[in-house]
């Protein structure tokens, strides 16, 4: 081998450690500044201890108490105290599991996971993910503020560096999930220079959720908060009907009907009492809405002339109500207005406004629906529309639906089409919903940045049979609506055809 084939060795790179500034002082100056230096070191020590106690209060304070007991008396007392605490904890967990989980287990799990899962590898993960900043020989890292473990997920609060934005973490979300042993990672902005990393370990919505019994439902329903399921945090999933319209988007088999039926299930007492009237259009020949016809004051099983006539009748009714409320000096519908709240359910909305081959009927349907969705909220008319394709070419007026629900979607690009721009970046991963979890959805309300994941109640055929019997057995006469204009058909509120 010739000498020219040799590779020159790399130069030796040694980084000089950063030393405190006072070590450079001469002896006399060091004596002069000694009180300042000692005070600075004392403040740093107190700050370090306070931060550790704040981060790990149960572990550190409990350990200090046991050590003090052992030094002050005997270590046998420490063993006895530890055994007593373990027994009390076991009794607490057995007798009051909810409070034990909320106060003790989550706190201990949070402290353990902060120290073991995140603390050990945080800096290495930040370097490998290119989420650090370098200035000369110094390397700066985003700082972990809080860790909250909920069992199925860890919420990690992170303080960003100067010049850093949440998009850097969003682009590294998959890498962060793998680094910390999570199934997925969601990035949520909290406030300036703060964000939350949601490290998901399990799906709390994997099992179907049964609805409450009809006998348990309250006769007084708040139309601003209608329960339709459970969120992934364990709270009730509430949807607003009063002064609102709802657009449900999902691919075939995603469970769109579960949201609609859960909504109508909780409205059943109000429907039976005549405080709510429901109208329906089912272009599939009644295969969906026809399973509980007793819910509806008027139900149409196609997308032709009867469906368009129903839409135009409701538009005329809405105008009549608006005129009545104007004369009465009322700005919007209220439960005491003497008129029932009207809900229009349109299954497969695109069949009515986009796939209709008759141009005349299509134009009339689009015009009537736009009138209802743009003006119907104040007069007490709400629309629940279901659609598979969220493209604007299919539903031109989707912006008139303030609340949007996205169940399982086929493509990532459809998330923003269904829920609005930026929804996918804020964590709404409707395209990742499993086919084994119908009814799981992401929802967005206009004016709010937060997206919410939930699952609707699982309404079976047996539930619908019970619901139909509940509403058709001895239903009282509904409250009258304001009279429609003379030009409107007199059979607007007739019984189901």
Image (cartoon, grey):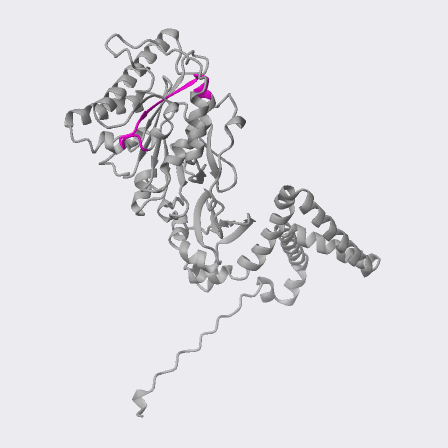
Quick check: 388 above or below 133?
above
Counting from the top left corner in percent of width and height, residue 145 is at: 54, 50
Counting from the top left corner in percent of width and height, residue 36 is at: 65, 56
**Residue sitting nearer the eye, 487 or 33:** 487
Q: Is residue 12 magenta?
A: no
Q: Residue furthest bottom?
A: 1
Counting from the top left corner in percent of width and height, residue 439 is at: 41, 40
**Residue sitting nearer the eye, 451 or 481:** 481
Counting from the top left corner in percent of width and height, residue 281 is at: 30, 27
Residue 397 lies left or right of residue 128; in this view the side is left
**Residue sitting nearer the eye, 49 or 320:** 320
Residue 306 lies left or right of residue 181; in this view the side is left
Residue 35 lies left or right of residue 233; in this view the side is right
Quick check: 118 above or below 415?
below
Q: Quadrant of residue 240?
A: top left
Q: Quarter holding the N terminus?
A: bottom left
Write the start and end of the magenta stretch as one range.
Answer: 270-287
Q: Quadrant of residue 28?
A: bottom right
């Amino acid at each position: 081998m010739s000498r020219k084939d040799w590779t020159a060795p790399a130069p030796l790179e040694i980084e000089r450690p950063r030393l405190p500034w006072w070590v450079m002082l001469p002896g006399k100056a060091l004596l002069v500044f000694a009180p300042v230096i000692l005070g600075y070191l004392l403040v740093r020590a107190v700050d370090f201890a306070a931060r550790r106690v704040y981060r790990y209060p149960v572990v550190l304070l409990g350990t200090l108490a046991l050590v003090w007991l052992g030094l002050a008396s005997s270590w046998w007392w420490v063993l006895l105290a530890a055994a007593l605490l373990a027994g009390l904890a076991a009794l607490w967990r057995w007798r009051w599991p909810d409070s034990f989980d909320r106060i003790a287990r989550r706190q201990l799990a949070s402290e353990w996971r902060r120290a073991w899962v995140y603390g050990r590898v945080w800096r290495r993960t930040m370097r490998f993910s290119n989420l650090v900043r370098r200035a000369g020989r110094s390397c700066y890292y985003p700082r972990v503020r809080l860790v909250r473990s909920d069992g199925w997920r860890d919420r990690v609060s992170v303080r960003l560096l100067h010049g850093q934005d949440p998009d850097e973490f969003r682009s590294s979300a998959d890498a962060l999930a793998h680094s910390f042993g999570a199934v997925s990672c969601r990035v949520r902005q909290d406030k300036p220079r703060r964000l939350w990393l949601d490290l998901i370990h399990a799906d709390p919505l994997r099992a179907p959720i049964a609805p409450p019994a009809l006998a348990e439902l309250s006769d007084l329903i708040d139309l601003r908060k209608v329960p339709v399921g459970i969120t992934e945090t364990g709270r009730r999933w509430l949807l607003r009907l009063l002064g609102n319209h709802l657009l449900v988007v999902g691919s075939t088999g995603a469970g769109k009907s579960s949201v609609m039926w859960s909504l109508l299930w909780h409205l059943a007492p109000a429907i039976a009492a005549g405080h709510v009237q429901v109208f329906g259009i089912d272009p599939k020949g009644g295969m969906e809405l026809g399973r509980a016809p007793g819910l509806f004051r008027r139900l149409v099983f196609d997308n032709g002339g009867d469906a368009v006539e129903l839409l135009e009748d409701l538009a005329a009714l809405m105008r009549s109500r608006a005129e009545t409320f104007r004369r009465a000096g009322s700005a919007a519908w209220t439960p005491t207005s003497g008129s029932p709240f009207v809900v229009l359910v349109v299954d497969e909305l695109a069949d009515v406004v986009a796939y209709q081959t008759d141009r005349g009927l299509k134009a009339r349907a689009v015009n009537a629906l736009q009138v209802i969705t743009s003006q119907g909220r104040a007069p007490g008319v709400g629309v629940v529309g279901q659609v598979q394709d969220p493209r604007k070419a299919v539903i031109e007026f989707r912006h008139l639906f303030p609340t949007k629900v996205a169940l399982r979607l086929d493509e990532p690009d459809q998330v923003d089409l269904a829920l609005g721009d930026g929804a996918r970046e804020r964590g709404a991963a409707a395209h990742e919903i499993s086919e084994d979890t119908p009814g799981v959805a992401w929802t967005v309300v206009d004016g709010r940045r937060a997206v919410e994941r939930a699952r609707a109640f699982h309404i079976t055929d047996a539930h619908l049979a019970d619901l139909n019997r509940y509403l058709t057995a001895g239903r009282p006469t509904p409250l009258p609506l304001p009279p429609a204009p003379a030009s409107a058909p007199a059979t607007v509120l007739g019984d189901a055809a």
